[in-house]
Amino acid sequence: MARVHLSRLPGDRVQVVEGEHYDVLDITALPSYVSGREAVDPPRWVWDDTARWYAPLLAAGVRVERCHDLRLCHRVLRRAPAAAASLLDGEQSDLWDRLRPAEPTDPALFSADDATEHLRADLEDARQLASVAASPESARLGLLLAAESASALVAAEMTHAGVPWRVDVHDRLLTDLLGPRPPRGARPRLLEELAAEVRRILGAPDLNPDSHPHLMSALRRAGIEVADTRRSTLQRIEHPVVEPLVRYKQLGHLFSTNGWAWIDQWVGDGRFRPVYQPAGSATGRWSSNGGGALSFPAQVRSAAVADDDWVLVVADVAQLEPRVLAGMSGDRALARAARGADLYQGMVDDGAVATRQDAKLGLLGAMYGATSGESGRMVAGLTRRYPAAFGLVEEAARAGERGQVVRTLLGRGCPALGGTSWDESPDAPPADLDDQDRRRRAYGRFTRNFVVQGTAAEWAACWLADLRNRLWRMGGDGAAGPRIDVRPHLVLFLHDEVVVHAPASLADQVVAEITAAASAAGWLLFRELPVDFPLNVSVVRSYADAGKPGGTAPVDV
DNA sequence: AGATCCTGCGCC
DNA sequence: AGGGCGCAGGATCT
């Protein structure tokens, strides 16, 4: 397949390199050039940053089949233990090392930020290809880079399409809980009333409940001794202030995080358009740097409503990380327990634990590094039943404690101890031995979790990539035109859950494709060992109804 | 005034 | 002494 390299040139021009052939386009000519190539024989578009190039293409109605995201792949290869770092060195490689994600920009232009140097996509791509080819694990690394690049396409497409959002529903929800929208800077009426009640009960007329020090001292004066003001701490206290205070905190959080200001900033034209960062976290999980897409609370999901005659198909994987652990460790006993919809129940039926809760505690404890309590105790017993799985995370933890890096199944390496993002205080503290020990153990918990969370992210990226292709093919030979949002399309992805916005008439077919994509992802990663990845699927009009009994029933629209 | 830290909460 | 994130407000530093 052809690889076409796109690089920015000063003056709103684009350099196009394909093999020996060089060309220069004006930026305004790019969409028609790309769509022309897509129509004939879709190449792999090689560019520095998918968000930067693809957003304006999508805005111009152009969809691309595949790409190679040099920034994301550069990061992966830099840290991958199976790739020789020296093969990435060369002209401009320091610039690629320092390249930051593109700022979310107005899709109409993509030159506002620069004065950029001419970053040569063709040169960097050649180094990356050589690096993968020279690796003893080129197949897995190649899959990882492809999945990562496809994720970047999905992220851009989801931002472009947006989550269908009913502002009227959201506004009614806020008004019911908080009172009418207040003027800027003021609290809504019901929130203000709760604050007044808290002040009255504590006898602190000037208290600002949002101020941590004020609240602590007011509680103390009322004879309430707490170490902090977390909800869970407060709820252990027997006192009339607890109920209104907890309520205040809940509603206050809704107001400030997903209130009217959030609507103003992130919802437009009936769509919620967050900004995603694929592989934005060290483990390879996505993060989001706008709109809080990966953490918007269940409380406001009722405002995510499909368009008329459309539905939301919501699917999440049951116990993704334990299943991934079974697959990557080759633990046949755990894989057997994972057959069926409930892995934890499978462990009970296996005779490994007495209750479902014990199974969950033990597995999560093993993956997070619990050392004490109920969870820590369950780990010991389960290690005997599932030695490969529990041994894998244990070994990852010990490697971290020794200061070694670990890697995911497809070869993503973790950041080094003391390296970027790990304990980098500029004024290097004179770390005593206790301190060093504490850091090593913390790093061990990180590496322990990294191998599982990171491989789960790889599974999810493969799931997304395959699903994206399947949904596009459903649309039927471009008959619906090149736009993605008139066909079934992804609108949300939350680590182990996807939401597809689709015409109601295609719902059953979408469910089938999501399920098939999950199987495909399992096969891509764990060929030799069969691990089930059962999904909970709901076809709903409103996201809030997902997961409820009856959600999978045919939807009346 | 702006940058940064801290706390607490939301999601997985 | 349980992993990964983002976000908001207040407190604190510069």
Image (cartoon, coloured by chain):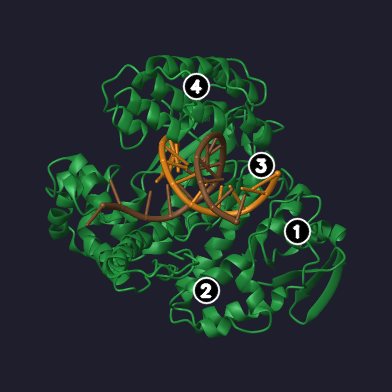
Chain colours: A green, B orange, C brown
Mark 1 or 2, closer to the camera:
2
Residue corresponding to mark 4 = A206
Residue A159: give x, y in percent of width and height: 64, 45
Of pointers 1 and 3, the one earlier in the residue sequence: 1
Q: Is residue A204 above or below residue A324?
A: above
Residue, disc 2: A77
Q: Earlier in the sequence, mark 1 or mark 4?
A: 1
Instruction: Please determine if labels 2 and 3 lie on a single subunit.
Output: yes
Please identify the quadrant where the N terminus of chain A is shown. bottom right
Q: In this rendering, would A61 be left or right of A532?
A: right
Percent from the top left, x then y, of residue A250?
45, 27
Determine whether the residue tagged by mark 3 lies in a helix, strand or loop: helix
Residue found at x 62% / y 46%: A158
Q: Which chain letter matches label 2?
A: A
Residue A92 image point, x, y percent: 68, 79
Closer mark to the observer between disc 3 and disc 4? 4
Which residue position holds label 1?
A39
Indicate whether A324 appears above or below A357.
below
Query: Disc 4 is attached to a residue of which chain?
Result: A
Specify the amino acid type for callout 4: Asp
At label 3, which amino acid type do we have?
Ala
Q: Are marks 3 and 4 on the same chain?
A: yes
Q: Amino acid at mark 1?
A: Ala
Q: Chain of mark 3?
A: A
Q: Secondary structure at mark 4?
A: loop
Which numbered disc, 2 or 3, marks the residue closer to the eye? 2
Q: Relative to the observer, which residue lies in front, A390 or A340?
A: A390
Of pointers 3 and 4, the one earlier in the residue sequence = 3
Q: Quadrant of residue A391?
A: bottom left
Q: CA distance from mark 1 to mark 3?
A: 22 Å
